[in-house]
Amino acid sequence: MASRFGLAEDIMSVTEPRIVFLRRDGEMVPLPEGMGLVLPTRLGPFVRTRLFTWPQKLRAGLDVFLPRYLDQEDMSIGRFLRHRLGSAVIERLADPLIGGIYGTSIEELSVDAVLPMLRDYEDESRSLVLASLLSGRKAPKGGGSPFRTLRGGLGDLIDALLTHLRAHQGFEERLGCAAVSLTTDHEGASRLRLASGEVITADVAVLATPAPVTATLIEGERPAAAVALRAIPHASTAVVSMGYRAEAFPEPPVGHGFLDASTGESGRSPSSGCTITSHKWAGRAPDGTVLIRSFLPERSRALVSRPDNEVFAAVERDIAETCGATEEPILRRIARWDNLMPKYTVGHKDRLATIEAALADRPRWHLAGASYRGVGLPDCITSGQAAAAATLAQRGDTASATDTG
Ligand SMILES: Cc1cc2nc3c(=O)[nH]c(=O)nc-3n(C[C@H](O)[C@H](O)[C@H](O)COP(=O)(O)OP(=O)(O)OC[C@H]3O[C@@H](n4cnc5c(N)ncnc54)[C@H](O)[C@@H]3O)c2cc1C
């Protein structure tokens, strides 16, 4: 998509070497090389890692002999992986890695909605470890990191998209204005009411708002769909960015960052992990400075609700303890993402089916965005493209009209 909008030259990859640590009760252990999202794709680094004791590695190896565990029913990733690989793999690897992405624990996330490949692995090979090692052998060598960004920041993609759209005759936009309801009139056209009082009439509508907002928009006309949309929980997370002088670190921080794999609530860090942004991406901070982003997950909600200075103080303490910062930061920023991160909990796919059934008689309303079939940006773009394709296919000659009321 970035290439399509003329940004091919600006796409950049993470810096090498890609070293990520797991922080466990104060100790930093490198993430073993060749780890897929939760499973090893190479045996050697997994056998040699200090992350697990020998009994824990042997327990994970038991997976090779266990019979299939999943039946037709969905299950939490935590329960499934604990059965197959043992508790240590959950606590030290799977929860920090997957829970870190969703801002919540894998004990509530769904195998079928979040990691359907685990079911495929079990179906095809019975053993997850063997299936993952096999996929590692088939993968092209030296594929590099899948992570990409844009040199000027991801906002450039939105700017380029808007420039592209604004060049089209008939394109109109309303920014900074909330939608409050979506209904259909007696001729079957959709009527979107805005907080300003304006009503936009359209032959097709794409609802790319988070599921709880979409529920509010359509509940007057489709209450059953609204109930199912509200049943998709959304986590609150926050990102705190701290900039330091390089001299603040007697020992320069190493690697791209770390994920927190500590257990037990007491004395636990407020952060699920930190990215050393100035190491991970070239050009993200001026020379002679270090930029660190700390992720505060759902379990730190109470802290995140406190005033900024209290949140900053907690994160500063954490960075001082973990990375050895001896000075105060020279830059502090916080971004709160309230009720925004969808949690695909057990039964998520059933909820999607309920929503689809409840909207079956509204074929010109399309849902898109992170609440449904993938939270990653590529998934969101795919869902937007699918909605756009369906819209174009459905649109006749009826142009959308605007009236104020
Ligand atoms: C901290 C954090 C880090 C992340 N890191 C990554 C990453 O590294 N890689 C990755 O792939 N993904 C990442 N994600 C996930 C990804 O960014 C999101 O899943 C994705 O941006 C969601 O896109 P969306 O369009 O569905 O929702 P949003 O971007 O939330 O868009 C929803 C839009 O709806 C608008 N809206 C809300 N209410 C109304 C209303 N009443 N009327 C009109 N408009 C309304 C909002 O203003 C917003 O513009 C991250 C997410 C978070 C929170």
Image: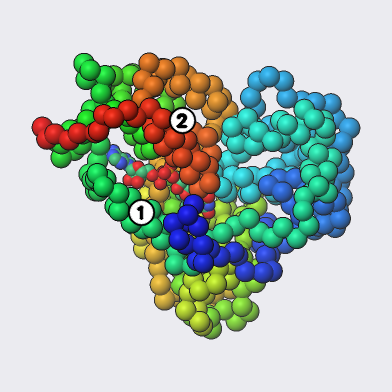
Determine whether the beta carbon of the residue marked 1 sits less than 8 angstroms from the nearest atom of ligand 1. Answer: no
* Residue plotted at (59% across, 44% down): 99
In-front residue for pair 261/137: 137
> Identity of the amino acid at label 2?
Ile
Q: Is residue 305 visible?
A: yes
Q: Is residue 143 left or right of residue 49?
A: left
Percent of width and height locating residue 246? 53, 81
Badge 1, how many Cα within 10 Å: few under 14, some, many 20+?
few
* Residue plotted at (55% across, 72% down): 282
Percent of width and height locating residue 111? 64, 32
Q: Which residue is mark 2?
A: 232
Q: Is residue 263 left or right of residue 190?
A: right
> Identity of the amino acid at label 1?
His
Q: Secondary structure at mark 1?
A: helix
Percent of width and height locating residue 96? 63, 49
Q: Which residue is mark 1?
A: 164
Q: Is residue 281 left or right of residue 29?
A: left
Label drawn at residue 256:
none
Q: Is residue 103 visible?
A: no
CB under 8 Å between discs 1 and 2: no
* Residue plotted at (39% across, 21% down): 363
Q: Secondary structure at mark 2?
A: loop
Occupied quadrant, residue 109: top right
* Residue plotted at (48% across, 44% down): 381
User: Spatial distance from mark 1 to mark 2, Cα to Cα?
Assistant: 33 Å
Percent of width and height locating residue 45? 82, 57
Asked if residue 120 is positioned above or below residue 51 in the image, the reply reads above
Asked if residue 291 is positioned above or below residue 346 in the image, the reply reads below
Sequence-wise, the earlier of marks 1 and 2 is 1
Which residue sits furthest left?
Answer: 405
Asked if residue 9 is positioned above or below residue 369 in the image, the reply reads below
